[in-house]
Amino acid sequence: MCTYAMVTYKVHYVCVPCRQSHKFLWDGAEHLCTRCRTPMVYAGHDFAAPRKTDGRRWAAVAAVLGAGLRYDGFELCGCSKDPKYRPRTSAQVRARRRMAARKGLTEAEALALRDPADA
């Protein structure tokens, strides 16, 4: 039996400019930021928001979400939970972007690598 088939879970939505995160039902509707009223970005089930004052970590969140990646560590049905790596600081993002430029990877592929030397 699938883990997520019987229960409806809330997922994280993020407004990066306001540095806010809220949980809403995953219904496909557009959720607006409570502060600036712009559409929030779907961040996934496993997102953990950094402190509002931590600019390095919010820069990494903006890079990950901008590359089209999400903070999900499972298949949509919930059968297999495999945590995915996402960079946590802007220094980790810069290292992966440099490596992507050298090796010809897309930004999303580079940001998903646990160790930039593995590519």
Image (cartoon, rainbow, N blue to C red):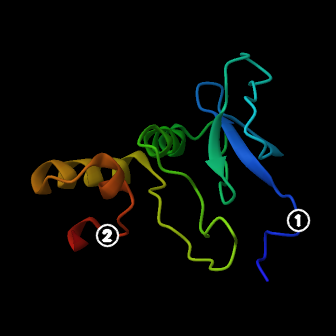
**Residue 100, above or below 24:** below
Q: Position of residue 84 (x, y in %)?
A: 51, 68
Residue at the far right: name it: 7
**Residue 111, above or below 52:** below
- Determine the image quadrant of residue 35: top right
**Residue 34, above or below 52:** above
Q: CA distance from mark 2 to mark 1?
A: 35 Å
- Residue flagged by tag 1: what amino acid is it? Val
Q: Position of residue 50 (x, y in %)?
A: 64, 47
Residue at the far bottom: name it: 1
Instruction: In the rendered structure, find residue 102 and report the number of the disc placed on it.
Output: none
- Looking at the rendered image, the quarter that the N terminus falls into is bottom right
Q: Which residue is mark 1?
A: 7
In front here: 47 or 27? 27
**Residue 66, above or below 99:** above
Q: Is residue 2 visible?
A: yes
Q: Position of residue 89 (x, y in %)?
A: 45, 50
- Residue flagged by tag 2: what amino acid is it? Asp
Q: Which residue is mark 2?
A: 115
Dot 1 alpha-carbon crowd within 10 angstroms: few under 14, some 14 to 19, many 20 or more: few
In front here: 39 or 86? 39
Question: Between disc 2 and disc 1, whose residue precedes?
Answer: 1
In front here: 57 or 39? 39
Mark 2: secondary structure: loop
Q: Is residue 50 visible?
A: no
